[in-house]
Image (cartoon, helix red, strand yellow):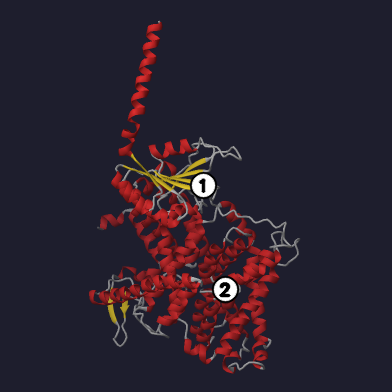
Amino acid sequence: MKNLYRSPCVRRSALLLVFCCSCVQSFQAIQQPTSCSFRFRRKGDDATLLRAVPFFDVMNNLPFEDVSRQLSDALDIGAEFLQDSDQLSSGSANIPEAETSIVLESMGQDLLIFLFSSVAVTILSNASGISPILGYLIAGAVLGPHGLDVFSNERADVELGDFGILFLLFSEGLEVSSQRLTKLTNYLPLGFAQISLTTGVITAALLLGAPQFFDRFLPLDEGFIDISNPTEAVVLALAGTLSTSAFIFPVLKERGWEGEDAGQAATSILLLQDLFVAPLLVILPFVVGQGPTDYAAIAFLTAKAALGFGFVMFVLSKVLQQVFRVVAKTQSAETFVALSLLVSVGMGAVAKSLGLTDTAGAFAAGILLANTNFRAQIQADILPFKGILLGIFFMDAGSLFDSELVLAELPTVLTGAISLIFLKGITVAAATRVPRWMEPNRLEPYDAVKLAFLLSGGGEFAFVVLALAEKLDVLPKDLGGLLTAIVLITMAITPLLGVAASAVSNNYVFDQRSHEFNHDTGESLVADDAIVVCGYGEVGEAVIDKLGELKNEDTGRPPSLVAFDMSPMLMNSILIPTPSSAVMFGDSANPEVIMAHGVEKPRALFVSYDDHEQVMSAVARLRFAFPESPIFTRAQSRYEAQELKEAGATEVVVEFDELPRSAQALLLKVEGEKKVEDNVVINV
């Protein structure tokens, strides 16, 4: 071992490992100056201290480690609001079997509750016509600690729900093509204006006596509205400035606004807000005078975030696509899904360890893969995880809603929520009305109205800012609970704000006839009613060739065709068999892959797979997703054909019947050719 350690390569690797580990969040639980420990607590029990490997003791001596660890802790969304549950503490050592069993059992119970609630919320939301997001929030409020209190492990549930936000931002990043990324940068000045102006407006409103003005007409609680300290007002304004990515992105997708200027601007501003959170958490203790003004620490953390994350992005831009190509060649769908999940979660962890938010890291990972041929397949693979985990996040957010406090302080809560929406909406709308010579990318009124409504609510990272403010004794505990309720209410009504945005913006449609929407979202230019061919083997290729011979009676053009196949050769290129057709990488048995390429209502679907079970699965899934589209396929026998029709196939070609049906024609054709040959010989 000594000789091994003397190797320069090994020594450098060891030093590099120690340095990199100083930035990793998984070692944030180091408590003692001479050991690495893990603590596990249960309510009513003394903490059990477990000794771990002391190899990482040196990490405590690295520069600015305390500041870095505090920042990493602070970036946990909602963690501070659940600190009293003490269900699970973080650490890097092994957990005893008994405690592990308790944790897993509690998480299992909560997952059953989440899954049952998810099914119930979806059914009731569809029946009542309300947004599922509102349903999840209501379910969380009813089942949470301020309601029926059925959750066993709230802290672990919050961590699980955070993965939903990661997958949401990763999926959004996949939509950012090179052209769209360029356009997102056009709205960065608007993003800076939104953050600065909103912070200033809310601060001014608090200090100039807006709460006291409303107290003349409404029965507000003076203990909550007496905000005369400038520092306290600035902290509240900074928390209120942030908006919710988790609620706004689903609204943009649901209403088809992602490709419009309003959607592009909202995405750019939300991303900028995410990047703004980390430096805000570093600077806030110095602003309020609760920490030493260590400019060297600030400079170190800034350099670590900028240079470190830039280096990671550079390396991954060279490596990531190659890794996906290697995995695709294995033809293992499970490995491809695992790699997609690893990239989204892993980049989030790397970004967080470097002092950024994990959502920013996940978004950046999506951007790296946005211009690849397997973008749509990745989106389809992570969609089930994103949907379920986002539901858990929304229920976790709803569980923080203290109904007793809201009812006791209802006038104050409602006044605060309405004021926040009004001030943010007016400020964003005003920021979009600067002269054209100052801002060439100024939004038209149609889009400005949408943006103002969408960004007027609170955001999930406001919880982080408020938690840190409570920790620094800037805000009293009771005020923190009230502000949490206000932020939750404004987040919850984001779908309703989307409805209002649509209704109000329609008033500008007739005045904006010249307004052109840019729907460039990076998706392929495939017609939304294209004919889809599943699989591009011998049969799929023949189907494409035959369908390409058809001509539209009105236009004289062939129909738009698109085929999908998991062949590795499609990882680097798109095949164009005919001018009207394209063959792309992806599993077309997954309807999400088809829709991700812009095919919303396929004219027809041809399933050309060889394996009967694969054909059955594809037909069932495609029929559920496209109930109005005809589905054509083939089978070896009549029994298989009957199964496929019961699964949803419109017509099935039975290969067993083809030879008997064609027997006469084949015989006549051969005999006719023979007679022609005989006549030629006789004539000669």
Classify residue 97 by image quadrant.
bottom left
Give residue 285's position: percent from left, percent from top.
53, 79
Of the 4 image quadrants, the one containing the N terminus is: bottom left
What number is the disc on residue 530?
Answer: 1
Identify residue type, mark 2: Leu
Q: Give above or below for 197 relative to 317.
A: below
Identify residue for label 2: 496
Q: Residues within 10 Å of mark 1 (few under 14, many from 20)?
A: many
Horizontal side of residue 47 vs 608, given as left or right: left
Q: What residue is rendered at 59% in x and 70% in y?
A: 499
Of the 4 image quadrants, the one containing the C terminus is: top left
Q: What residue is rendered at 31% in x and 53% in y?
A: 7
Q: Residue furthest left?
A: 97
Q: What residue is rendered at 37% in x and 15% in y?
A: 675
- The one nearer the camera, 667 or 200, is 667
Q: Nearer the viewer, mark 2 or mark 1?
A: 1
Give residue 453's position: percent from left, percent from top.
62, 71
Identify residue type, mark 1: Ala
Cα–Cα span, label 2 and label 1: 34 Å
- The one nearer the camera, 602 or 191, is 602
